[in-house]
Image (cartoon, helix red, strand yellow):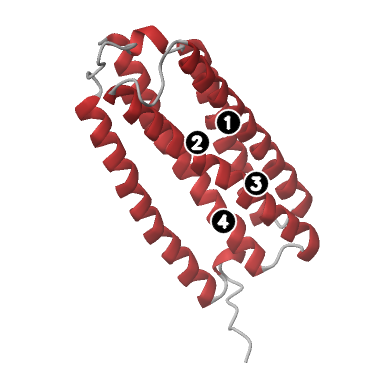
């Protein structure tokens, strides 16, 4: 028996299974919040333990970090535009904005990898101090999430090309959108409590 479809709702919410999947993903994001809260807590405790190694002021490149921030926040905006086009039933517009979102995310990742290379050249490695260990783990965990998000969204785009816009593909787009916005929110906290706070200490 086919699932009952409620066409009065947005496409991604039209079946009960979709609604349950979206609810389940919100619960998953709660677990992700706990993960990053733990990483932030560890970082806050050990952020002054330099062990004679580089400090925040020695290695942070605020100009590059600002560019990273602009790229990621812009990608959140374009992701929102993708959802807007999905709600309008515009498949071409949806795919276009998703591709732009992934391009911006890729630019962010490229700059983050360059940042890590800069740290290593400055003698700042994950083994150097507790500060750097917690910094690399926090930034690396976020970067790994962004990498996974790019791969995941790419798979969704392939499904959109093959299957078109259906309640199932719309649900997948909506969920990846939630995930992407979550990563942007986490980055705002990283930018504020790691970079800005570190530079004014």
Give the alpha-carbon distance from disc 2 to disc 1, as whole Å: 7 Å
**Would you say the residues marked 4 and 3 are in contact, meaning their CB atoms lie under 8 Å apart?**
no
Q: Kindly identify which residue carries mark 2.
A: 143
SS at mark 3 in the image: helix
Q: Residue at left 77%, top 65%? A: 163
Q: Could you say which is closer to the camera, residue 3 or residue 88?
A: 3
Q: Which residue is mark 3?
A: 82
Q: Pick the quarter of the image with the N terminus.
A: bottom right
Instruction: From the image, state whether disc 3 or disc 1 is nearer to you.
Output: 1
Up the image or down, 120 lies above or below 84; here it is above
User: What residue sits right under mark 4 in the picture?
Assistant: 174
Q: Dividing the picture into quarters, in which one does residue 186 lie?
A: top left
Using residue 99 as the reference point, say whether residue 178 is left or right of it.
left
| Upstream in sequence: badge 4 or badge 1 | 1
In the rendered structure, find residue 109 and report the number of the disc placed on it.
Answer: 1
Of circles 4 and 1, the one toward us is 1
Counting residues from the N terminus, which is met first, the one under dot 4 or under dot 2? 2
Q: Earlier in the sequence, mark 2 or mark 1?
A: 1
Badge 4 or badge 3: first in the primary sequence: 3
């Amino acid at each position: 028996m086919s699932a009952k479809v409620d066409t009065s709702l947005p496409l991604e919410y039209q079946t009960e299974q979709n609604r349950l999947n979206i609810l389940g993903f919100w619960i998953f994001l709660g677990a992700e919040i706990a993960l990053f809260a733990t990483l932030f807590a560890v970082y806050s405790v050990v952020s002054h333990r330099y062990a004679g190694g580089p400090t925040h002021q020695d290695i942070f490149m605020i100009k590059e970090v600002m560019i990273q921030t602009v790229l990621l926040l812009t990608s959140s905006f374009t992701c929102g535009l993708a959802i807007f086009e999905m709600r309008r039933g515009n498949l071409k517009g949806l795919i276009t904005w998703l591709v732009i979102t992934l391009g911006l995310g890729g630019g962010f990742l490229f700059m983050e990898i360059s940042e890590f290379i800069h740290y290593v050249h400055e003698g700042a490695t994950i083994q150097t101090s507790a500060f750097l260990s917690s910094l690399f783990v926090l930034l690396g965990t976020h970067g790994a999430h962004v990498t996974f998000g790019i791969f995941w969204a790419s798979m969704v785009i392939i499904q959109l090309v093959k299957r078109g816009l259906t309640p199932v593909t719309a649900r997948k787009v909506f969920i990846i959108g939630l995930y992407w916005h979550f990563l942007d929110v986490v980055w705002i906290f990283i930018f504020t409590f790691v970079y800005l706070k570190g530079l004014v200490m």
